[in-house]
Amino acid sequence: MIEYALNEVEQDFADRYVRPFLPDRIFDAHAHLFAHRHFNEVPDTYASTPAEVGVSAFYDYIKAIHTGADTVGGLFFGLIFLGDWQGNNAFVAEETAGQPLDLGQMIITPDMDPEQVREEVRRGGFVGLKCYHLLANVDYPTWQAPIEAYLPEAHIRIAHEEKLSITLHMVRERSLADPQNQATIRRYCEQYPDMRLILAHAGRAFNPWHTIEGISSLAGLKNVWFDTSAVTEAGAFEAIIETMGHDRLMYGSDFPVSHIRGRCVAVGDSFHWFYAHDMNLNEKHTQLEPVMIGLESLRSLNLACHRMKLSDSQVEDIFYHNAARLYGFEG
């Protein structure tokens, strides 16, 4: 369930781990906008949200986890990949029009004609593209799809020519530690240097060891960034900062996932999502009280920045200036 406000436990958590850490100004580099009409059927998780979740609703909701900070802009894209994604794209374009720090990325499908991608990006005023594995052209579970199956090279070429960003949520069992993923990312980035690639979820680091093991394969690439969205362990953030530099990491909330209570943990060589509504909260030693995923992620980022001994100005880079430099709104 998407929650709107912090409960007492979350307020204490935020006061302890989040509020003292946050800079004054935040640009959220990973957030979803959508309307219920775009779903084939509204999932139970989203039933409590307004019928339209546009930028106004986002700014209203996000105050809960960005406690004490001013959220000044965001990179927004749709949530609907198997419903009316065209309608969701139009909604994002409308919601981000005319606001200099409200930027939109366009959902693409792998079978879209490249020139159609170019035309729709220009018409919608999008700054980038959003691909997703659920749309992959494969006849097996899309969780195992190679990047090319849902982000074809023809779309990379358009992004290069139009100087667009692409937010990529890669899959396969070991994500960034997968040699095929590594090779594709390096090839795309080297051949198309004006395409700006953002690896979502810290390189899909829901098991942080996958990013820790794989990050060196991307060393030296000048057009790769990472966002922090919904990652609730610190190790991947530390590996990115150490290998790529703190200026390649951008904060993202993954709204509205940020407002679900739970967290993700590494289990063996994979990971598991725990959600409060389906957990056994009765432990031998205590009664568990899960908090919003967005708060867990911010605490993990706090830990990484602390352990990497980042300065206040470097933390401000992660929350604002890195995105500002990428998208040219530094001021």
Image (tube, rainbow, N blue to C red):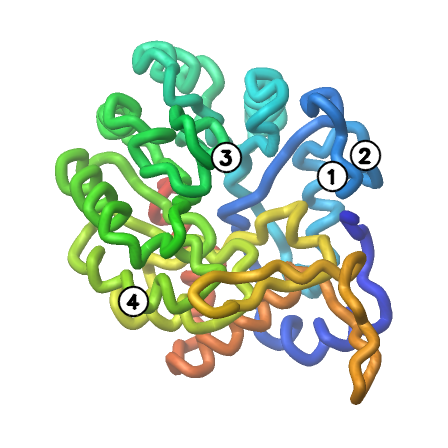
Asked if labels 2 and 1 touch by Cβ distance under 8 angstroms, the answer is yes
Q: Is residue 246 left or right of residue 277?
A: left
Which residue is found at the position 63% from the left and 56% from the top?
A: 70
Structural distance between the alpha carbons of marks 4 and 2: 41 Å
Q: Which residue is mark 1?
A: 57
Foreground: 143 or 260?
143
Residue type of the residue flagged with mark 3: Leu
Query: Which of pointers 1 and 4 lies earlier in the amino acid sequence?
Result: 1
Q: How many marks?
A: 4
Q: Which residue is mark 2?
A: 50
Q: Quadrant of residue 218?
A: bottom left
Foreground: 119 or 20?
119
Q: Which residue is mark 3?
A: 103
Q: Position of residue 107 (x, y in %)?
A: 48, 26
Residue type of the residue flagged with mark 4: Glu
> Which callout, 4 or 3, points to the residue nearer the camera?
4
Which residue is found at the position 61% from the left and 52% from the top?
A: 71
Q: Position of residue 100 (x, y in %)?
A: 51, 34
Q: Is residue 5 left or right of residue 159?
A: right
Q: Which mark is residue 213?
A: 4
Structural distance between the alpha carbons of marks 1 and 3: 15 Å
Query: Which of pointers 4 and 2 lies earlier in the amino acid sequence?
Result: 2
